[in-house]
Image (cartoon, rainbow, N blue to C red):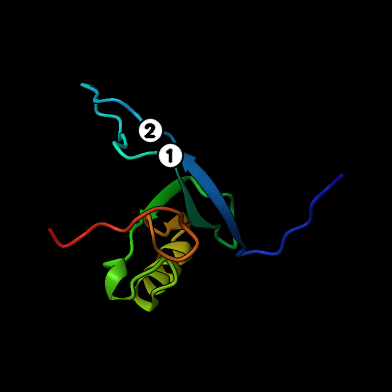
Amino acid sequence: MSTSRTYPYTEEAYATLPRSSPSTDSSPTSSQPSSLLSYALTHPTSDPPTRLALLAHPWGRLGGSKDDHVVVGVMNALVKEGYAVCRYDARGVGGSVGVSATWT
């Protein structure tokens, strides 16, 4: 079965971040229990992307999310330059599961 898409398009999806133990390598890890993160992956209109940008949003407790107007503006500029852009909601923000970080 073939899937037809119009470009640019955005995939809305969720990813599970597993609980991990401390590590000495440079890979990102999570010291919190598993969480489901909401993310959006947007592709450019032209050729398949050869670069990927990962955008984080402003502080969630002050209203930041992957759909924040600044994040979307940066995404649009990067997509025009040929980047695929992944935006995500941090824990406890938007569609992501978990508890948002505290001020302390």
Check if mark 1's residue and mark 2's residue have beta carbons within 8 Å: yes
Quarter containing the C terminus: bottom left
The amino acid on which the numbered mark 2 sits, given as a three-letter code, is: Arg
Q: Nearer the viewer, residue 72 or 44?
A: 72
What residue sits 32% from the left and 37% below the top? 30
In the image, 57 versus 4, the foreground residue is: 57
Other-residue count near label 1 (Cα within 10 Å), few / some / many at <14 / 14–19 / ≥20: some
Q: Which mark is residue 19?
A: 2
Badge 1 amino acid? Ser
Say which label, 1 or 2, has the lower sequence index.
2
Q: Quadrant of residue 44?
A: bottom right
Which residue: 48% across, 57% down? 82
Kindly identify which numbered label has been placed on residue 11.
none
Mark pair 1, 2: CA separation: 5 Å
Q: Position of residue 78 (x, y in %)?
A: 41, 63
What residue sits 87% from the left and 44% below the top? 1
Vertical order, 24 against 79 (above or below): above
Residue at label 1?
34
